[in-house]
Amino acid sequence: MKKMLAILASPRSSGNAANMLDTAVQKAGESGFTIEYIDLYKKDITYCKGCMGCKKIGSCVINDDIKEIERLIKECDLVTVACPTYFANVSAPLKNMFDRLVGVAFDDNNSFIPKPKLSQKQKYLILITCSTPAPFDKLAGQSTGTVKAIREFFHVSGMKHAGTVIFSGTRNKSEVPLKITKQIHNIIRKAGKK
Ligand SMILES: Cc1cc2nc3c(=O)[nH]c(=O)nc-3n(C[C@H](O)[C@H](O)[C@H](O)COP(=O)(O)O)c2cc1C
């Protein structure tokens, strides 16, 4: 059975990013995935120390909740990350999670090009929220800043992009529009087939 790792990177557990992720989780269940759900704001994950000890042992030297995520990210077929846009970037816990996973994501070699450690058979789906309405979320580099930061991590890890869905103009909205729900469903359905 395929496994999906769902990561909520918003502090609002009933907010728009959480609702998008719930949509993905429901569809993934229907598409034959087993689900592991991580609410990042509820995890005990301290800051990366920048010691690069992980490069020697392939795992972070700090023993906290990152260990659970290290295991789950290596095991999953699809990881779905739901994140709000904060200052045209990812939320702080998500950035910290990426930093703490550097030893799991890639190896250094003699060139400046990182050597991916995760599998090309693994895929990632990005779900983004931002209050800036379209097309200004893109023109002003808002949602695109968040997407770029997430893609950077998964790209150097070697995982394949399954899709990105952006819910822009979220101010005063609490329901995921049908158009967005359909986009999420389509990507999950395809990921479940391959
Ligand atoms: C600290 C903070 C910074 C934000 N920065 C941006 C931003 O740079 N661009 C933007 O369009 N929205 C920004 N927003 C708005 C959120 O991205 C938006 O409200 C989003 O829908 C929140 O997702 P949630 O419903 O999952 O909490 C910011 C919100 C907060 C709390």
Image: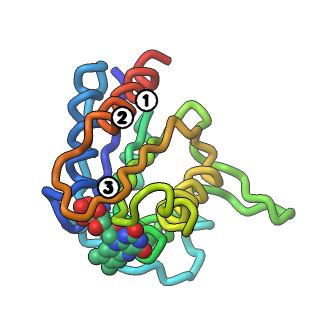
- Determine contact: label 1, label 2, CB under 8 Å: yes
Q: Position of residue 142 (x, y in %)?
A: 49, 67
**Label 2: how many Cα within 10 Å (few below 14, some 14–19, many 20+):** many
| In the depicted structure, whether residue 29 falls above or below residue 72 | above
Mark 2 CB within 8 Å of ligand 1: no
**Label 1: how many Cα within 10 Å (few below 14, some 14–19, many 20+):** some
Please name the amino acid that badge 1 sits on: Ile
Front residue (pair 104, 149) = 149
Q: Position of residue 186 (x, y in %)?
A: 40, 25
Instruction: Provide the residue designation for mark 3.
Output: 68
Circle 1: element type:
helix
Circle 2: element type:
helix
Circle 3: element type:
helix
Asked if residue 27 shows in the view, the reply is yes
- Marks 3 and 2 sit apart, C-alpha to C-alpha, by 26 Å
**Label 3: how many Cα within 10 Å (few below 14, some 14–19, many 20+):** few
**Which mark sits nearer the N-terminus, 1 or 3?**
3
Ligand 1: image quarter: bottom left
Give the label, 3 or 2, closer to the camera. Answer: 2
Mark 1 CB within 8 Å of ligand 1: no
Front residue (pair 98, 67) = 98
Q: Residue at x 20, y 48 (%)?
A: 19
Q: Position of residue 18 (x, y in %)?
A: 22, 52
**Which mark sits nearer the N-terminus, 3 or 2?**
3
Judged left or right of residue 62, residue 194 is right
| In the depicted structure, whether residue 41 falls above or below residue 15 | below
Please name the amino acid that badge 2 sits on: Ile
| In the depicted structure, whether residue 51 falls above or below residue 145 | below
Q: Quadrant of the N terminus?
A: top left
Judged left or right of residue 153, residue 46 is left
